Image: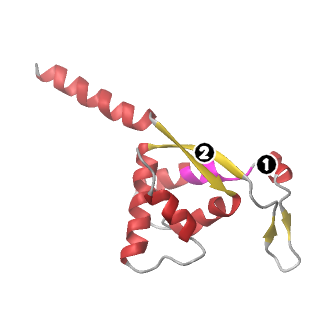
Amino acid sequence: MENKKVKASQNKAKNTETHLIQLSLTIKERLDFAEILPERSDIVTQVLSRDIREKISFTQAEAKKFGMKPTPKGGLSWDKGRETNIAFTVPEITLMRAQVEKLDKERNVSTAILSLCLKIREIRS
């Protein structure tokens, strides 16, 4: 009986890690993740953060497709109104929500990242 409980628990954990949640993100929201993800934390959190950063990073093909170009003042321009669906795991979503909640409690949500914060808060997993 105990062995069945352990296997059920392991299966549930595996399903949580493999269940993907699609999130439609604008180019700006993808760039805004730098403001939300932690710079320093424990190893597990940093692994999740790295995985999120890899998913939201832009390929050369995307940069060309979105018309991304450096501006003379060191910024970045792109074709507005473009969104991309990106799949995240439940643990990644959990980390995002925790970070948004932390920023909110610290009254550290700027207007620049508000759109991304609201989108993350509204995710149904």
Q: Is residue 105 left or right of residue 39?
A: left
Label 2, label 1: how many angstroms apart (C-alpha)? 13 Å
Tell me which numbered mark, 2 or 1, is placed earlier along the sequence: 1
Above or below, 107 against 43 in this view is: below
- The residue furthest left is 1
Q: Residue at (70%, 59%) from the top-left corner?
A: 27
Q: Nearer the viewer, residue 29 or 57?
A: 29
The stretch of residues the image draws in magenta is 52-58
**Mark sitting on residue 106:** none
| Mark 1 neighbour density, 10 Å: few (under 14) some (14–19) many (20 or more) | few
Disc 2 marks a residue whose amino acid type is Ile
53 or 96, which lies in front?
Answer: 96
Kind of residue at disc 1: Glu
Task: Say which residue label 1 marks.
Answer: 62
Using the image, tell me which numbered label, if any, was put on residue 86.
Answer: 2
Q: Is residue 16 left or right of residue 84?
A: left
At 79% from the left edge and 48% from the top edge, which residue is drawn?
62
Task: Find out whether residue 83 is within the magenta segment.
Answer: no
List x then y, in percent, for residue 52: 55, 51
Magenta segment main secondary structure: helix
Give the side of residue 45 with respect to residue 110, left or right. Answer: left
Q: How many marks?
A: 2
